[in-house]
């Protein structure tokens, strides 16, 4: 009879300790939603937002990495594979904006 009680108390203790370690940042890089950008999309996408959507860095290699970044993100978010049509349109908008801005340079 004592064994199930001891196992139960041990499981509860482990859960509480694990939760505290995760919240303090010991187990995770950042806690929960803190690693994501807050807010939604802007009404008119700018270069900074387009770079963030595609997960690129603003440097000289942006033109070389644009196609691969777009392809990688669209594979994960394409509407034919269960992704959101809205997100797919924003990803395509970001690619088009960066294509146009990089062609001018």
Image: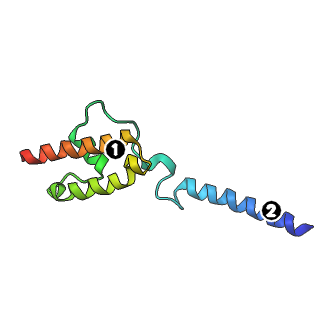
* Dot label at residue 88: 1
CA neighbours of label 1 inside 10 A, class few (<14), some (14 to 19), many (20+): some
Snapshot quadrant of residue 15: bottom right
- The percent position of residue 105, horizontal first and vertical second, equals 6, 47
Query: Closer to the camera, 93 or 47?
Result: 93
**In the image, what residue occupies the spot 80% across and 66% down?**
7
**Foreground tag (2 vs 1):** 1
Q: Quadrant of the N terminus?
A: bottom right
- The percent position of residue 32, horizontal first and vertical second, equals 51, 50
**In the image, what residue occupies the spot 31% across and 46% down?**
53
Element at label 1:
helix
Q: Is residue 52 above or below residue 40?
A: below
* Dot label at residue 51: none
Q: Is residue 51 above or below residue 7?
A: above
Q: CA distance from mark 2 to mark 1?
A: 47 Å
Q: Is residue 7 above or below residue 71?
A: below
CA neighbours of label 2 inside 10 A, class few (<14), some (14 to 19), many (20+): few
Confirm or deny contact between disc 2 and disc 1 (CB under 8 A).
no
- The percent position of residue 93, horizontal first and vertical second, equals 25, 41
From the viewer's perspective, is 59 left or right of 32? left
Q: Earlier in the sequence, mark 2 or mark 1?
A: 2
Q: Which residue is mark 2?
A: 8
Snapshot quadrant of residue 101: top left
Residue sitting at the far right? 1
Snapshot quadrant of residue 85: top left
């Amino acid at each position: 009879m004592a064994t199930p009680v001891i196992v139960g108390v041990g499981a509860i203790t482990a859960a509480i300790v694990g939760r505290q370690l995760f919240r303090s940042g010991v187990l995770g890089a950042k806690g929960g939603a803190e690693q994501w950008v807050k807010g939604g999309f802007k009404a008119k996408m700018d270069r900074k937002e387009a770079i963030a959507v595609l997960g690129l860095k603003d440097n000289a290699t942006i033109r070389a990495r644009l196609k691969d970044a777009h392809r990688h993100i669209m594979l994960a978010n394409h509407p034919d594979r269960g992704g959101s049509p809205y997100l797919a349109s924003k990803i395509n908008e970001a690619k088009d904006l960066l294509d146009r801005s990089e062609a001018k340079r």
